[in-house]
Amino acid sequence: MNDDAPIHDNPLSALALEVVENFSARGFTVATAESCTGGLIAGMITDIPGSSKVLDRGYVTYSNDAKIEMLSVPEEFFDEDGPGAVSEEVAEAMAKNALQKSSTDIAISVTGIAGPGGATEDKPVGLVWFGCACDWAPTFTISRYFDDNGRDAIRAETVMTALMILIETLKEAPDKEPDQDEA
């Protein structure tokens, strides 16, 4: 990192800096597919100088229609008998399809309930599903229940978790093959 780089003492900024440095150093790119965070993950990454080498694109798919149209999430997921927007199935489809549509190395997705409304008995405020798709491992999903300390807190915890998933997943990536021009 150069001496002109800002000091990132905010935990989110520090994680975003780690994403940009690690991905850039290894030549990997990322796409985001965001619902409850509304683009905050991509925003944190692009706050870091040099992020253009890392972030290919971000999909903000807040509505069900956007998830269907932009990320080809199956429409039946949103039917009365489907799993619904905040589900493992939707998080997985968002990540897989963001990876496929962007041609990046890794895609992270988030879909959840940041509140204050929108909760049900089965899906409380603070429930967030994450999906991660990459070229070197099977797509995986995880869920987290964040304390209902307000919308901003839930969204910040979601961004932090997504950035940590990216950092940890990159650690498992094999080294990239050099381009023909570099060989």
Image (spheres, rainbow, N blue to C red):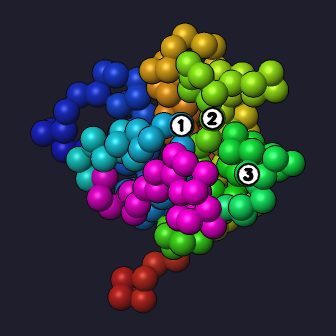
- Image x and y of residue 102, in percent: 49, 70
- Residue depicted at x 47% and y 56%: 59
Residues in magenta?
Answer: 51-72
Residue at the extreme bottom of the image, as rendered: 180
Q: Which residue is mark 3?
A: 78
Query: Does residue 174 appear in the picture of this structure?
Result: no
Is 48 situated left or right of 6 in this image? Answer: right
Q: Residues within 10 Å of mark 2 (few under 14, many from 20)?
A: many
- Image x and y of residue 84, in percent: 75, 45
The answer to which quarter of the image holds residue 96 is bottom right
Q: Amino acid at mark 2?
A: Gly
Q: CA distance from mark 1 to mark 2?
A: 5 Å
- Residue depicted at x 34% and y 22%: 10
- Image x and y of residue 139, in percent: 72, 57
- Image x and y of residue 135, in percent: 64, 67
The foreground one among 59 and 11 is 59
The foreground one among 128 and 173 is 128
Q: Which residue is mark 1?
A: 36
Q: How many marks?
A: 3
The quadrant of the image that shows the N terminus is top left
